[in-house]
């Protein structure tokens, strides 16, 4: 059984992405690949698209084809497109879905894919940090970006959703004097409650701070946290949480 959706706003792209067989047959610029998925960049009619193809449900071939994950739980590709749709519904800037779907055989997941349009004139924050981009030394620019990242993170957590990989590489920033932050790539995000939600929220914040502590001043990091909490100053509870955030990866790297 094949379930496939094509965005009606992209009729000219149907020849490339009209069904799952065409998507898996595409040849393009390989961006990343592993035993679970591959990402291609494809150009057509003056636009560029990212094509992410999943095969199986785990990195081990034995687990991928004979493990329970093939039949139980949502496939990562489904989670990824559902999360992108949720981001858009919550008002979070993200990549536009052009096509997505999956194929099942004998009731188990076989393969799936999603296609997004490239967001032009953007760079990911991790790449900017590696390149020592001068904008990271511009306090006004940093404040604009930091506030948007704080708003995005607060929106996710207010919905009881944790990204689980909220790293600088998954945040794109547009060029110009008025940058816009886009959140991308979220196959492992999900909804939580109680203590597990608290733990996942701290993990999200710690992932952001892991690079932030190398690129930003202490005052900039604190300002981000206050924007996230919408507090004028830190409370005792905030200070306890900040301690958990800054120590989260101790002994894990």
Image (spheres, rainbow, N blue to C red):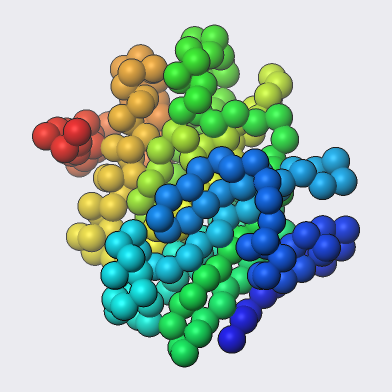
Q: Residue at x 47, y 90 (%)?
A: 106
Q: Position of residue 154 (x, y in %)?
A: 43, 47
Q: Position of residue 178 (x, y in %)?
A: 68, 25
In the image, 84: left or right of 36?
right
Q: Is residue 109 above or below residue 13?
A: below
Q: Position of residue 32 (x, y in %)?
A: 51, 43
In which image quadrant can residue 204 be found? Answer: top left
Residue 235 in sight in this render: no
Q: Is residue 6 above or below residue 210?
A: below
Residues 172 and 39: in front is 39
Residue 72 in sight in this render: yes
Q: Is residue 112 above or below residue 224?
A: below
Q: Which residue sits furthest left?
A: 251
Q: Residue at x 69, y 40 (%)?
A: 119
In the image, 223: left or right of 170?
left
Residues 180 and 159: in front is 180
Q: Position of residue 86 (x, y in %)?
A: 55, 62
Q: Residue at x 33, y 30 (%)?
A: 209
Which quarter of the image is occupied by the C terminus? top left
Q: Residue at x 38, y 17 (%)?
A: 216
Which quarter of the image is occupied by the N terminus? bottom right
């Amino acid at each position: 059984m094949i379930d496939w959706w094509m965005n009606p706003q992209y009729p000219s792209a149907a020849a490339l992405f009209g069904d799952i067989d065409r998507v898996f047959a595409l040849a393009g610029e390989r961006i990343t690949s592993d035993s679970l998925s591959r990402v291609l960049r494809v150009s057509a009619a003056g636009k560029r698209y990212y094509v992410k193809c999943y095969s199986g449900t785990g990195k081990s071939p034995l687990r991928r084809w004979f493990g329970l994950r093939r039949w139980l739980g949502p496939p990562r590709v489904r989670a990824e497109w559902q999360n992108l749709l949720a981001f858009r519904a919550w008002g979070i800037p993200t990549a536009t879905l052009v096509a997505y779907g999956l194929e099942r055989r004998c009731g188990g997941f076989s393969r799936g894919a999603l296609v997004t349009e490239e967001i032009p004139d953007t760079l990911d924050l991790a790449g900017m940090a590696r390149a020592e981009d001068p904008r990271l030394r511009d306090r006004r620019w940093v404040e604009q970006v930091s506030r948007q990242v704080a708003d995005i993170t607060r929106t996710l957590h207010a919905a009881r959703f944790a990204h689980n990989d909220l790293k600088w590489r998954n945040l794109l920033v547009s060029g110009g004097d008025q940058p816009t932050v886009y959140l991308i790539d979220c196959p492992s995000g999900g909804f939580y409650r109680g203590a597990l939600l608290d733990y996942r929220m701290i993990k999200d914040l710690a992932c952001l701070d892991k690079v932030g502590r190398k690129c930003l001043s202490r005052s900039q990091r604190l300002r981000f946290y206050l924007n996230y909490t919408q507090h004028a100053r830190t409370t005792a509870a905030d200070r306890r949480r900040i301690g958990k955030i800054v120590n989260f990866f101790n002994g894990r790297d």
